Image (cartoon, rainbow, N blue to C red):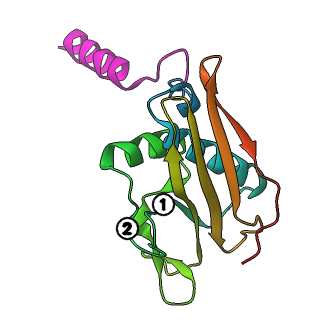
Amino acid sequence: MRLPLLSTVALLGACTTAPADGDPPPPPPLAADMRAPVLALFEHAVEAYFAGAGDLPPTTCAVFRSEGDNHGDSGLSAAQEERLLKRFPRLAPADRCQWDGSKYADSITGDPATVIDVYRFRCEGDSACTGWVNTRGQGACEPAAQYRMRFAEGRWRFTRDERVLAQ
């Protein structure tokens, strides 16, 4: 009676034990996907934001804006947003950051939120694109900037336009 019980416990333990290698590797960089330039630009902007946001940044969402859309839907497909969320576990789904008329807030907690948005995104051919990135909300200190992108040597490369925006 004891032997089958020990075998069962050992088998169950084997099912719940983490692999010896530790955590699974992160998804491949989005900048390596020539067919996903807008995701590559988001990756570039989100990495830079989290690098300077400290250990406990506010709820942060990524929003792709169509022309004339100031505070609307994310504009990313569900598959695109899923790829971003897998790449950046600290990123929240776009619908979690809500505009309340004066600021962005986390729709669950009510705390301030930050939105990283890409807009005026255009590609000329398969390997050259431009787009604007803006970070809005608490802790956002970067002004909006235009990026030129070119796919070269197996990844999207970025050049930030350093001209000051007159708005």
- Report the predominant secondary structure element of the magenta stretch: helix
| x and y, in percent, of residue 165 in the image | 76, 69
x 53%, y 33%: residue: 30
| Residue at which label 1 appears | 63
Q: Is residue 44 shown above or below 11?
A: below
Label 1: element kind: strand
What is the quadrant of the N terminus in the image? top left
Single out the residue that lies furthest toward the bottom: 101
Q: Disc 2 marks which amino acid? A: Asp
**Residue at horizontal 61%, vertical 24%?**
155
Tell whether label 2 touches label 1 (CB within 8 Å).
Answer: yes
Residue 134 in the figure: left or right of residue 121: right
Q: Is residue 49 left or right of residue 118?
A: right
Q: Residue furthest front?
A: 124
Residue 73 numbered mark, or none? 2
Q: Is residue 96 magenta?
A: no
Disc 1 marks a residue whose amino acid type is Val
Residue 8 image-quadrant placement: top left
The span picked out in magenta is 1-23
**Cα distance, mark 1 to mark 2?**
7 Å
Q: Position of residue 152 (x, y in %)?
A: 64, 21
Q: Position of residue 65 (x, y in %)?
A: 46, 63
